C-alpha cells in the first residue's frame, strides 16, 4: 500500500519508501562491520518489526539467524500502558549468543528496556538494539540503542509495520495519522 492510497487518513508524510530503504542500507553496513567476527541472532519483536526485519535481513551481506518474540504494551489505543506481557517467546537458546533486537519504534522505551534486561538475563554474550524510529520526546526510561533509523516527533505514526487497530501495517512509508481516524 502506498502513502497516496491512504492520503486522506494521514496528516503528514514522515518517511517515504526510498528514505527508509536508504537508511536501512546504511545501518546494514554498520552492522556488517560490527558483527564481522560473529554473526548476530536477530530478534524481531512482533508484529511491528516485521517490515524492518525483512528488509534489514535481506540487505545484510553477512549470515544471520532470525527469531521472534511477541510482547504487548499498547493494546489498540495510542498511548503506551507500561505493561509488558510475553505473548510468544523465542525458540532459540541465547546462552553465549550475540543478540540484536530489531524493533520498529521506541516510544516510551518501556518495552525495550524490559526486553533488553529479559534477554540479557538468559545468558546472551551481548544484547544490542536496533530501532527504525525513536521518539525522544516520549521517553519515560533511558534505553541504550545502538542503531537508530530516524528520530521522529511525538505524534501517532503508522505504516511500515506500525498499526492503528491493526490497520496501516502494510503501508510502504510512515505517516502521522490524522486525528479524525482515531477520534
Ligand atoms: C509497539 C512497538 C514497540 C512498542 C514501543 O508495539 O512495536 O514494541 O510499542 O512502545 P514503548 O517504547 O512505549 O514501549 P505494540 O505493543 O504496539 O505491538 P505491535 O508491534 O504488535 O503493533
Image: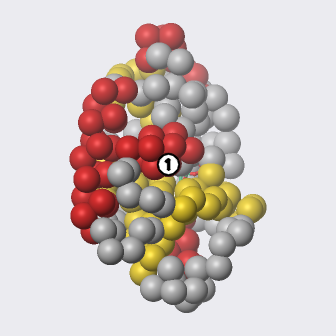
- Tell me residue 25's x, y (percent): 29, 43
User: What residue is drawn where x is 37% and y is 50%?
Assistant: 60
Task: Give 104 or 59, whichever is nearer the viewer.
Answer: 59
User: What residue is drawn where x is 37% and y is 26%?
Assistant: 17
Task: Give 156 or 51, whichever is nearer the viewer.
Answer: 51
Could you tell me if residue 131 is visible in this image?
Answer: yes
**Total of numbered circles in the picture?**
1
The quadrant the C terminus occupies is top right
User: What residue is drawn where x is 63% and y is 47%?
Assistant: 47
Q: Is residue 28 above or below residue 2?
A: below
| Image-based side of 144 in relation to 102, left or right | left
Binning the other alpha carbons within 10 Å of mark 1 as few (below 14), some (14 to 19) or many (20 upward) gives many
User: What residue is drawn where x is 51% and y is 86%?
Assistant: 96
- Tell me residue 68's x, y (percent): 63, 59
Q: Is residue 38 above or below residue 154?
A: below
Q: Quadrant of residue 63?
A: bottom left
Q: Residue furthest right?
A: 87
Could you tell me if residue 142 is visible in this image?
Answer: no
- Tell me residue 169's x, y (percent): 57, 32
Q: Is residue 118 above or below residue 61?
A: below
Disc 1 secondary structure class: helix
Return the residue at label 1. 53
- Tell me residue 1's x, y (percent): 53, 18
- Kindly tell me whether mark 1's CB lies below 8 Å from ligand 1: no
Amino acid at each position: 500500500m502506498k502513502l497516496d492510497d491512504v492520503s486522506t487518513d494521514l496528516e503528514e508524510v514522515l518517511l517515504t519508501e526510498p528514505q527508509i530503504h536508504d537508511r536501512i542500507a546504511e545501518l546494514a553496513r554498520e552492522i556488517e562491520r560490527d558483527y564481522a567476527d560473529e554473526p548476530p541472532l536477530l530478534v524481531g519483536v512482533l508484529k511491528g518489526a516485521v517490515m524492518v526485519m525483512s528488509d534489514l535481513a535481506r540487505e545484510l551481506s553477512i549470515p544471520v539467524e532470525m527469531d521472534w518474540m511477541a510482547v504487548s504494551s499498547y493494546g489498540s489505543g495510542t498511548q503506551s500502558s507500561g505493561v509488558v506481557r510475553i505473548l510468544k517467546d523465542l525458540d532459540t537458546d541465547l546462552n553465549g549468543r550475540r543478540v540484536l533486537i530489531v524493533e520498529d519504534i521506541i516510544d516510551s522505551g518501556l518495552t525495550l528496556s524490559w526486553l533488553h534486561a529479559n534477554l540479557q538475563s538468559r545468558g546472551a554474550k551481548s544484547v544490542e538494539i536496533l530501532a527504525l524510529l525513536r521518539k525522544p520526546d516520549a521517553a519515560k526510561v533511558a534505553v541504550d540503542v545502538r542503531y537508530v533509523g530516524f528520530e521522529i516527533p511525538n505524534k501517532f505514526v503508522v505504516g511500515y509495520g506500525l498499526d492503528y487497530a491493526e490497520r496501516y501495517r502494510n503501508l510502504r512509508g510512515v505517516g502521522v495519522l490524522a486525528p479524525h481516524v482515531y477520534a
